[in-house]
Image (cartoon, helix red, strand yellow):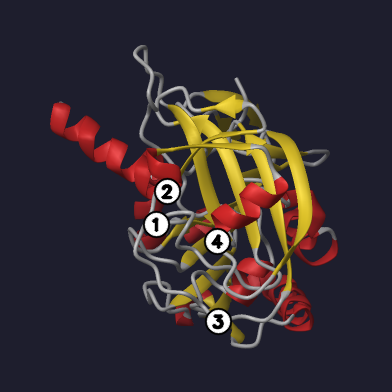
């Protein structure tokens, strides 16, 4: 048990402590910083800030937020008065700050991640008692497909079933307009979903997608990789402990997972049990992406767009 706790603590430290990343030479520009809590359920702050060449995440935070550091200054212990409930405390709770750059949980310290113009940095304060972090989140869309992560930009494929080919084409056109260069649209049967060198956006009904074992495996291990929904006769939204708090007869989800532990390519699921809700979810991505900004994942019903995991 002590070994497991030590391992988990090392993961938390890795999110914000000093790592060994290399500098990425970039031009001056702006990045966006979103500060939230509760797995994206409550946005605390959002700022567009100027960055010069070789600016790292912790420098941005020091210059634009009131932060508290620990362990020699490389670990962010508090932001604007909201502090870790684990670091340095006798009565510890597993609640801490985690940071994501362009939708991917960073594996290097805040001093060692050097930013590019238009990057989106999301700091979220949340409970890690159940050891689920959600290594890939949707809230940096579409920058995640444009800037990549840690200087690595990957090809993106939109993979659709026959019923959603039109939606796939519309999404393809939008992402090209936004600046995604290496992207194509293929049928589900021709998609290279297991390729860890590319991102995949998969669109289709759950009845069709669950036939693919690779997709089904992610779903069945959702409690380990940060999927906060269940799909069967109804669409259920879960809290961070895996408990169903809301259910709908018709709905869809937009969620993502990393394809490989520690990797920076992701698989996005746009799926559900109702054709209109699935189309509405895709439409969000090419007509109103602001609705998912800063979110971990979302459930799309006939009337609402709900962040998941759902707040208790």
**Residue 217 visible in this rendered orientation of the protein:** yes
Q: Which residue is mark 1?
A: 107
Name the N-terminal-most of marks 1 and 3. Answer: 3
Residue at 63% across, 49% down = 61
- Asked which secondary structure carries label 3, the reply is loop
Q: CA distance from mark 1 to mark 4?
A: 20 Å
**Image location of residue 174, percent across then percent down:** 78, 76
Query: Which quadrant of the figure has residue 44?
Result: top right
Name the N-terminal-most of marks 1 and 4. Answer: 1
Name the N-terminal-most of marks 3 and 4. Answer: 3
- Point out the image quarter for the C terminus: top right
Contact? badges 1 and 2 (CB < 8 Å) = yes
Q: CA distance from mark 4 to mark 2?
A: 22 Å
Identify the mark at residue 15; answer none if there is no mark.
2
Residue at 38% across, 65% down = 263
Name the N-terminal-most of marks 4 and 2. Answer: 2
In this rendered view, identify the residue nearer to me: 45 or 231.
45
Q: Which residue is mark 4?
A: 268
């Amino acid at each position: 048990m002590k070994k497991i706790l030590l391992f988990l603590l090392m993961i938390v430290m890795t999110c914000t402590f000093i790592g060994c990343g290399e500098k990425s030479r970039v031009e001056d520009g702006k990045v966006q910083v979103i500060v939230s809590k509760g797995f994206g359920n409550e946005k605390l702050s959002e700022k567009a800030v100027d960055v010069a060449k070789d600016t790292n995440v912790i420098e941005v935070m020091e210059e634009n937020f009131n932060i508290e550091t620990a362990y020699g200054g490389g670990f962010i212990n508090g932001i604007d008065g909201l502090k870790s409930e684990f670091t340095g405390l006798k009565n510890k709770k597993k609640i801490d700050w985690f940071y994501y750059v362009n939708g991917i949980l960073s594996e290097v310290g805040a001093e060692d991640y050097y930013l590019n113009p238009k990057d989106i940095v999301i700091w979220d304060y949340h409970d890690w008692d159940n050891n689920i972090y959600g290594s890939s989140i949707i809230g940096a869309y579409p920058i995640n497909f444009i800037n990549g992560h840690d200087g690595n930009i990957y090809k993106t494929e939109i993979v659709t079933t026959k019923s959603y080919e039109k939606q796939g084409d519309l999404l393809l056109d939008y992402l090209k307009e936004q600046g995604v260069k290496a992207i194509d649209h293929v049928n589900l049967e021709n998609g290279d979903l297991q390729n860890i060198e590319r991102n995949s956006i998969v669109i289709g009904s759950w009845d069709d997608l669950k036939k693919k074992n690779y997709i089904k495996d992610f779903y069945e291990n959702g409690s380990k990789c940060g999927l906060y929904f269940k799909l069967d006769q109804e669409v259920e939204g879960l809290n961070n402990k895996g408990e169903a708090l809301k259910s709908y007869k018709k709905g869809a989800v937009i969620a993502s997972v990393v394809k490989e532990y520690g990797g920076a390519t992701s698989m996005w699921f746009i799926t559900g049990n109702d054709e209109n809700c699935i189309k509405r979810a895709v439409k969000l991505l090419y007509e109103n992406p602001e609705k998912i900004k800063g979110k971990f994942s979302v459930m799309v019903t006939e009337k609402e767009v709900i962040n998941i995991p759902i707040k208790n």
